[in-house]
């Protein structure tokens, strides 16, 4: 199939613009506390809806990523030192927004000895310390920490409700899409979570439309399940710019339904599959639709 840089978006990918008083109030809160959201940094198409619901996915450890994934809109650059006040500020934002479910992700920080895992643990601790009476459920979307098991153990010890690590694409496309990542290393991270704490829910996500085949996607489903992944998200890739990996194909809503059916057959406890699905989009629904352990 020919690679296309720009093609008109189909109707099912059209969303409302990011505007309104509630949206502005969320952005102003983040700015006042010197916090970042992956919603804005990654140019998520659902940003307007989520800010309108007074929800956001927090992005810790700065705005500059040490990796150069070709699908991602987050800036690659030289990062600053982690903000020692970030955990306190983030906990305050969670309280002021009245969040029942919190998603925390980060840029990849290969420059830090622990990959930033202690910052994840500190943020979780700060939220639980500040909101003792009614603590929200917490999901972390973590990088691979370059395979460092001790770094992963730091995050697990903080006991987030869900540990998410996105597989992103099929192994054949890793050199093009995730040149500094490793498919097997990501799978190993998910299985290590289960080996260290079998009660912890694990989650991953894949983008489609980058040139993968259906059989390759199904093989990823099988690999994730073999490594103990509980929850799965499947969404449409949208190229942030002509300099990023090109969009190869718009996947139809009917195809997303089929992918969900196949994921359910593979044994995932919860699957979100759709053109606008993103890893943190309505993330609370996974636990809401999963029986308590």
Image (spheres, rainbow, N blue to C red):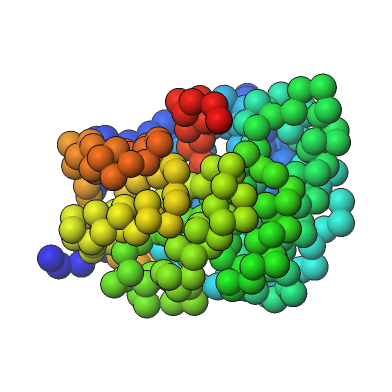
Q: Nearer the viewer, residue 35 or 223?
A: 223
Residue at the image position 48 percent from the left and 37 percent from the top: 281
Q: Quadrant of residue 220?
A: bottom left
Q: Quadrant of residue 278?
A: top left
> Is residue 103 at all visible to an observer of this figure?
no
Q: Is residue 90 left or right of residue 253?
A: right
Residue at the image position 15 percent from the left and 67 percent from the top: 2
Most extreme residue toward the left, as rendered?
1
176 up-or-down from 211: above or below: below
Image quarter where the N terminus lies is bottom left
Q: Nearer the viewer, residue 95 or 288?
A: 288
Q: Nearer the viewer, residue 293 or 136?
A: 293
Residue 54, horizontal then vertical, whole percent: 62, 27
Q: Is residue 285 left or right of residue 95?
A: left
242 up-or-down from 44: above or below: below
116 up-or-down from 90: above or below: below
Residue 140, horizontal then vertical, whole percent: 62, 47
Residue at the image position 55 percent from the left and 60 percent from the top: 192
Q: Nearer the viewer, residue 124 or 187?
A: 187
Image quarter where the C terminus lies is top right
Residue at the image position 44 percent from the left and 77 percent from the top: 179
Q: Is residue 45 left or right of residue 255?
A: right
Residue 107, horizontal then vertical, whole percent: 62, 61
> Is residue 117 at all visible to an observer of this figure?
yes
Q: Quadrant of residue 82?
A: bottom right
Residue 76, horizontal then vertical, whole percent: 58, 70
């Amino acid at each position: 199939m020919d690679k296309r840089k720009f093609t008109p978006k189909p109707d099912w990918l059209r969303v409302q613009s990011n505007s309104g008083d509630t949206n502005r109030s969320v952005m102003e809160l983040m700015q006042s506390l010197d916090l970042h959201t992956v919603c804005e940094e990654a140019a998520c198409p659902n940003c307007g809806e989520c800010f309108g619901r007074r929800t956001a996915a927090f992005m810790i450890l700065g705005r500059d990523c040490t990796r150069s994934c070709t699908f991602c809109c987050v800036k690659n650059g030289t990062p600053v030192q982690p903000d020692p006040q970030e955990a306190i500020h983030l906990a305050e934002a969670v309280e002021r927004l009245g969040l029942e479910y919190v998603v925390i992700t980060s840029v990849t920080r290969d420059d830090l000895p622990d990959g930033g895992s202690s910052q994840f643990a500190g943020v979780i601790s700060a939220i639980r310390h500040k909101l003792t009476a009614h603590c929200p459920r917490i999901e972390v979307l973590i990088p691979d920490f370059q395979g460092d098991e001790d770094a992963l153990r730091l995050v697990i010890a903080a006991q987030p409700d869900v540990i998410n690590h996105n597989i992103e694409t099929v192994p054949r496309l890793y050199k093009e899409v995730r040149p500094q990542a490793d498919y097997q290393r990501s799978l190993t991270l998910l299985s290590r979570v289960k080996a260290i704490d079998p009660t912890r829910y694990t989650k991953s996500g894949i983008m489609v439309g980058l040139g993968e085949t259906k059989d390759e996607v199904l093989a990823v489903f099988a690999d994730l399940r073999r490594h103990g992944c509980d929850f799965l998200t499947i969404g449409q890739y949208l190229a942030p710019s002509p300099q990023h990996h090109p969009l190869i194909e718009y996947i139809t809503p009917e195809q997303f339904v089929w992918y969900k059916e196949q994921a359910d057959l593979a044994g995932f406890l919860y699957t979100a599959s759709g053109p606008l699905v993103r890893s943190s989009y309505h993330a609370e629904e996974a636990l809401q639709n999963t029986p308590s352990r």
